[in-house]
Amino acid sequence: MTVRLHWFLPTGGDGRTLVDRHAYGPNGKAGRSTPGLRLPDIEYLAQIAKAAEQLGFEAVLTPTGTWCEDAWLITAALSQHTERLKFLVAFRPGLLSPTLAAQMAATYQRVTRGRLLLNVVTGGDSSEQRRFGDHLDHDRRYERTDEFLSIVRGVWRGEPYDFQGAHYQVDGGLTALPPDPVPEVFFGGSSQAAGPVAARHADVYLTWGEPPAQVKEKIDWIRSLAEREGRDVRFGVRLHTISRDSSAEAWATANRLLDDLDADTIAAAQAALGRSESVGQRRMLELHGGSRDQLEIHPNLWAGVGLVRGGAGTALVGSHAEVADLIEEYHALGIEHFVLSGYPHLEEAYWFGEGVIPELAARGLLDRTATGGSGGGAPLLVAGGR
């Protein structure tokens, strides 16, 4: 098992700070003055996508929500600016017919010559779901995702498919031209409602970057559930990264990001994040408790991002060799896919690509034939958060 590397597309905006970059005014201008703000226009996102492809990342993850650009449309445009890079397109199963989603995925595969990955986000925040008109509670959203994925796989068989469930009733569902290759399924979720869905549908289970011991507990949990279903599951982790030529430089960069955060900003962010129903989000908050003290929660694993950002709240911080060491530690647990990001995303892609990727290659952890989108199936990523 080798390491599979992916980057992130900041379709809600980017910058040199962790402070919220997603509040825009009526004319697309920043809602407040944030130093270094970069709006998510197609030219800037194309720079990141091209950099990721050139540096050797296999794919880029796109988020979903009211705070970012639509993932289907923006990545379809970016596919015309790249040649091999795959796109992890995020969408929410409660807002789209599963038969239509299957058809869209098949079309996307043909248009991009097999470069689609689908990020099916169940959703852990009821307030965000209600903005889209979805009023199901947390556990019922996972029940719906279970049915959704059953239908998607059913209609990809290329023959009429019937389904009768609590959330969907489909008569003769069909994708006349199934996707080729048929996407694999990635799934993320830390709740008891999420586990059985992962066991039934996931090819790869994706977790946020908790310390290795906690990640191992999740791996053991999902693996045992999958075994009861007679299935095997592979694993991935979602992390930020700050990698530099020296450890001191990396930690100085992390500390500079903290300099932008005052106590009121952190308190407001923690209050908002604490209202989320997501068990994974709660586990992220518990790593630091809203305090700046002891943010290095494991050697070279830093929880500072989670003070103000939702979703993935931890970062790999250190020299290129130290970051590679921690990746190797996760890999030894069974983690194969690493979905990475950093602020700003263009510069951090180069720091990682030119510093850590050669380290991983020297250790024999990279399969260069799989990098850049050549070979293998295009995964369907099922995950929550960013």
Image: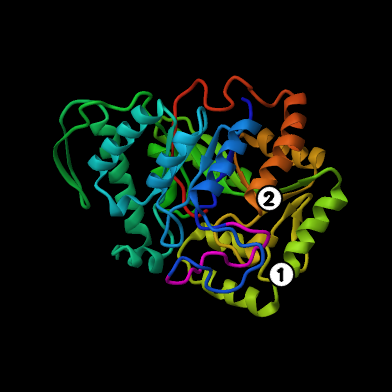
In the displayed structure image, the side of residue 74 where residue 273 appears, left or right: right
Q: Quadrant of residue 26?
A: bottom left
The disc, 1 or 2, on the residue closer to the chain's N-terminal end is: 2
- Identify which amino acid the numbered label 2 is placed on: Pro
- Identify which amino acid the numbered label 1 is placed on: Asp
Check if residue 307 falls in the magenta segment: no
Residue on which disc 2 sits: 211
The region drawn magenta spans 14-26
Check if residue 20 falls in the magenta segment: yes
Residue on which disc 1 sits: 260
Q: How many marks?
A: 2
Q: Residues within 10 Å of mark 2 (few under 14, many from 20)?
A: some
Q: Residues within 10 Å of mark 1 (few under 14, many from 20)?
A: some
Query: Residue 218 versus residue 10: which sits nearer the camera?
Result: 10
Q: Position of residue 38 (x, y in %)?
A: 59, 58
Coloring basis for residues? rainbow
* Image: 262 above or below 374: below
Q: Position of residue 322 (x, y in %)?
A: 80, 41
Instruction: Determine whether label 1 and label 2 are within 8 Å by CB.
Output: no
Query: Residue 213 versus residue 257: which sits nearer the camera?
Result: 257
Q: Position of residue 203 (x, y in %)?
A: 45, 33
Task: Using the image, tell me which numbered label, if any, was put on residue 290.
Answer: none
* Image: 45 above or below 180: below
Q: In what quadrant of the picture does the N terminus appear? A: top right
Query: Residue 216 versus residue 101: which sits nearer the camera?
Result: 101
Residue sitting at x 73%, y 26%: 361
Work out whether residue 92 can be spotted.
yes
Work out whether residue 212 can be spotted.
no
Say which element carries label 2. loop
